[in-house]
Image (cartoon, helix red, strand yellow):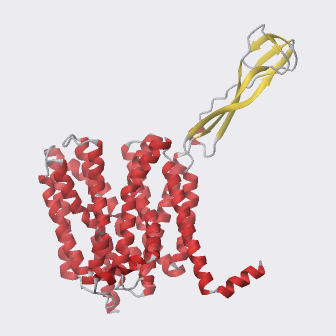
Amino acid sequence: MNNLSQSHKILFLNTLAFSVCFACWTLNGVLVTYLVDKGIFNWTVVETGWLLGIPILSGSIFRLPIGILTDKYGGKIIFSVLLLLCSIPLFLLPFATSFWSFAVLSFFFGLVGTSFAVGIGYTSIWYPKNWQGRALGIFGMGNAGAAITTFIAPTLLNNFSETDPVNGWKMLPIIYAAVLVFIGILFIVFAKNKVNPGVSKTMGELMSPLKNVRVWRFGAYYFLVFGCFVAYSQWLVPNFMNVYHTSLVMGGMFATMFSLPSGVVRAFGGYLSDKFGARKVMYWVLGSSIVISFLLMFPKMEIFTAGPGVLATSNGVVTEISADAIVVNGKVHKINQKEVSEDHETAIFPVKNSWQEIVVKQNQEVKKKELLAQGITQIKFSANLWVYVILVILIGISWGIGKAAVYKHIPEYFPNEVGVVGGMVGLIGGLGGFIGPIIFGYLLNYTGLWTSSWIFIFVISVLCLLWMHRTIINVMRTKSPNFNRHIEDNH
C-alpha cells in the first residue's frame, strides 16, 4: 500500500508539472497575438507565425534526448532541472526588444514541451503493468494545461495593461516563470528518484530501439492523435471565423470545446486500454477517425447545374408569357418558379431547389421540342454549424482516447526504454503539431477548401489503420500458420 501511495504522489506531481509546462508551451499563442494586436511589436505575419511555432518545434525535437536522459538518470533529476532552467528565458522575456531576441528566448522556454517525455518514463516505472494505461492516461490529462492559458492569459494581459498599456504584458511571463520555479522546488523536496534497473547504460544500447519499425508505427499513430490535435487547436479558430463568420471569442470557445474534452478524456482512454487492450482501442480510435473525418470533408457549398427544362410540344407561336406559364397556340406550358427558403442555414442535409427560366419572347415562332424555359437546379449544403461542432468534439475525444492507447503500448513492448521510445514517439507527434498548420495552409491555398485539412486527416487515418491491420495479420501468419490455413480451408 505504501508503494502505491508513493506512486500516486509521484503521479500527482508529474501531472501537475506537465500541466504547468503545457500551459507555458502554448503561451506564445496568446502573448504574441496580443502584442501584435495592440501594436506593441510590429511583427509581420511570417514573423508572428514563426514565434507561434518555435516553442512547439523546440519542445518536440528535444523530446528524444530528454527521454534518453530520463531513462539514464531518473525523472526527478531531469524534471527538476528542466523546470528551473526553462524559467530563466521566461524571466528574461520582458527584456526582449526585437524579433530575434523574442525568438531565441521562445526556443529555450519551449523546451518545457519535452516534459512529456520525462513524465512518461518517470510515471511508468512506478506502476505495475495492469495500472500503466490508467497512470499514463491520468498523466496525459496535463495537456489540458493549454486550456489554462487560453482562459486565463487574455484576462491577465488585459488587467496588467490597464495601468501600463505598453509594459503591462511583461508581468505574464514573470508569473509563468515563478510557477515553474515553485513546481521545480516541489519536485526537489517531495519527489523520489527512481531509475529502471533494466535500463541500458551505453548510448548505443539506449538508441537501439529506434531501429525497430514498431517505434515508427507508434509515432505515426501519435502524429495523428496528438500532432493533428495540436494543429487543430490552432487551426479551428480561423476555420470557424472564415466559414461560419463567428467572432474571435466564439471561435476560441468552439476550439476550446474541441481541445478540453480531448485532454480530460485521456485518463478514460488509459482505463479502456488496461481493460480491453491498447490494440483493440486503437482499432476503434482509427475507425472513428476515418468515419468522422469523412463526414467533416464535405464543405459548405452551393452548386448550380442544369435541371429539367420545358420544351414546346408542337410547332407554333408564343401567344402569352406569364411568370408561371407559356402559351403556344393555346397550349399552356407550366413554369416552376424559384422558391425562396430561409431554412437552408439550419438544414442538416443538402437542400435541392429546381426552377425554370423563360428563354423565349412574346410572338416568337417555335418548333416542336424547342426549349421554352431552361431548367436550373440548386443544391445547397450549409454544413450546419452545430453538427460541425459536435463532430469536431467527437473526433477530439476519439484522439484523446487514442493518445492514451498509443502510450499504453510503449511500456509493454519497451519496458526498459520507455523514456527513449516515448521521447521519439512524442517527437514525431510534436512535429505533427508544428507542421500540421503549415500543411493545412498549403492545402487551403491549393484547393480553396477549408475542409481540405479533413481530407488530409482522412488519408492519414486510413494509412494508420491499414498499417496496423497489416502488421497484426502478418504476426498472426507467423505465430499461428495452422490457424490461418484452417481459415483458408473453411472459406
Count how many numbered circles sit on residues in the image: 0
Give percent across and percent down for residue 421.
Answer: 38, 76
Res 455 seen here? yes
Location of the N terminus by quadrant is bottom left
Location of the C terminus by quadrant is bottom right
Q: What residue appears at the point 44 percent right and 57 percent down from the top-left corner?
A: 258
Relative vertical location of residue 140 with respect to residue 369 in this rendering, above or below: below
Relative vertical location of residue 272 with respect to residue 327 in this rendering, above or below: below
Relative vertical location of residue 261 with respect to residue 48 in this rendering, above or below: below
Res 16 seen here? no
Q: Is residue 474 left or right of residue 319?
A: left
Give percent across and percent down for residue 387.
Answer: 55, 50
Q: What residue appears at the point 78 percent right and 11 percent down from the top-left corner?
A: 320
Residue at the left extreme, as displayed:
95
Q: Is residue 30 left or right of residue 444?
A: left
Q: Is residue 220 left or right of residue 70?
A: right
Q: What residue appears at the point 30 percent right and 87 percent down from the top-left corner?
A: 6
Give 107 or 178, whichever is nearer the viewer.
107
Give 96 or 100, whichever is nearer the viewer.
100
